[in-house]
Structures are given as C-alpha cells and as structure tokens.
Amino acid sequence: RKEVEQDPGPFNVPEGATVAFNCTYSNSASQSFFWYRQDCRKEPKLLMSVYSSGNEDGRFTAQLNRASQYISLLIRDSKLSDSATYLCVVNLAAGNKLTFGGGTRVLVKP
Amino acid sequence: TAGITQAPTSQILAAGRSMTLRCTQDMRHNAMYWYRQDLGLGLRLIHYSNTAGTTGKGEVPDGYSVSRANTDDFPLTLASAVPSQTSVYFCASSDGLRAFFGQGTRLTVV
C-alpha cells in the first residue's frame, strides 16, 4: 500500500460547481498535511496547509480526519483557472520526509 | 528573492554518461529533497537531507547520489545515466513544515 494515495481523476467539473476529493495516508504518526497545486508539470506550489480543526481559504476548504486517516479538499464556485493537479503532501515529524500523493487532476469546463 | 534554483533547466544526456543536477536555496532551510516526476507516477522521493552533513534515501534512490556539504547546496549526481532516468527532477527545501520547489530540470537520457 502506498503511504499517500489519491484518486488520479480527472474530475470534470462544470464552471461554478463544487468539487471535493480526498487523500488517504497510511502512517498514523503523520504530523503535517498540505495541499499543493501543480500546473502542466511545473513546480508544485503550496495551496494550503491542513489543520486539525479544518480551515478555509476563499473558495477552498481543507479538512483532516485523523480517525480515518484522510484529508480532503473542497473547491466551491469552480473557476476555469482551478484546472490543475492537486497534490496531497504528508510530513512525518520523524525523519522530516515529505511524501506526496500521486495527485488528483481537476478539469473545470465552461 | 531567488528562493530555490535548479540548473540546468533541461538536458539531453547520452546513456552511460554522468551528470550532476544542481540545486541551491537562499532561505537557510535545513531540509532539502530531490524528487522525480514521471507521467502517471506522481512525485517520488529520491534522496533527502535533514541538515547539512546528513543525507537519507527516499523511495527511489538507486542510480543516484547526493551530498550536502553546506546548507545552501544539494546536488544530485547520476553516475552512469540510463534511459529509465529520463524524467523531470524537482529539488525542494523545507522550513520544517512547508516545501518550496525549484522550477525543475527536464532530463532526457538517450
């Protein structure tokens, strides 16, 4: 089993709709969680950190479920510019190794 | 601000030749990483370094070596390149939580 797993998609989303997807992680000792965005094999860029209580940044909402060992990302009112691959990242405090999921591709269409 | 810089941005390399991919950061981050990204496989960790003078193996270390003589530089060396090492290579550094990426090196081994 991979340490961090994501549905590769693509998620085809009508403009203005809401899309949500999850990322599961296998190591219960994982400490930090992030969502990154990557466009066309350019470098990944931090979208948002994921906090235990859940957090929101504009149209983006991230949630952490430690009991079931997954994090989620929800995008409201999708824009064409939201089309990208969204990477889930998990950091084990011990060893400080950032482990990436394979990414979820989102395609927002007019 | 430069952040994290990789060189070269792209390279075509003959099989059997050696090559060093350069990575430099000016953020004084302790942790640095090398990933490769292949279509359908996401980002895979090659090697990492938690601090100057230490390195560790990631998920796919075979055929690669790294060194961390100082905080700023983390070069990745391919001693004898093979076609399966054709990939996009990303270097990253971390402030202990978030990772920041270089723009990537596109390497083709022929």
Image (cartoon, coloured by chain):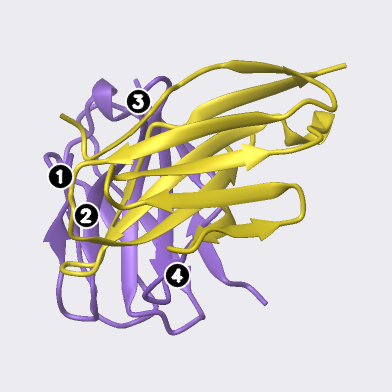
Asked if residue A53 lies left or right of residue B34, the reply is right
Q: Chain of mark 2?
A: B
Asked if residue A9 lies left or right of residue B16, the reply is right
Q: Give the residue type that dot 2 points to.
A: His
Choose the circle earlier in sequence order: 2 or 1: 2
Q: In the rendered picture, chain B carries what hue?
A: purple
Choose the circle earlier in sequence order: 3 or 2: 3
For disc 2, the neighbor class at 10 Å (few under 14, some 14 to 19, many from 20) is many
Number of the label disc, if any, that sits on residue B24: 4
Dot 1 lies on which element? loop
**Residue in the image at 24% along x and 43% along y:** B18
Do marks 3 and 2 share a subunit?
yes
For disc 1, the neighbor class at 10 Å (few under 14, some 14 to 19, many from 20) is some
Q: Are marks 1 and 4 in contact (CB under 8 Å)?
A: no
- C-alpha distance separating marks 3 and 2: 17 Å
Q: Which residue is mark 1?
A: B61
Nearer to us: label 2 or label 4 = 2
Q: Quick one: quadrant of the N terminus of chain A? A: top left
Chain in yellow, by letter, is A
Q: Which residue is mark 3?
A: B41
Q: Are marks 1 and 3 in contact (CB under 8 Å)?
A: no
**Residue in the image at 53% along x and 63% along y:** B5
For disc 3, the neighbor class at 10 Å (few under 14, some 14 to 19, many from 20) is few
Q: Give the residue type that dot 3 points to.
A: Leu
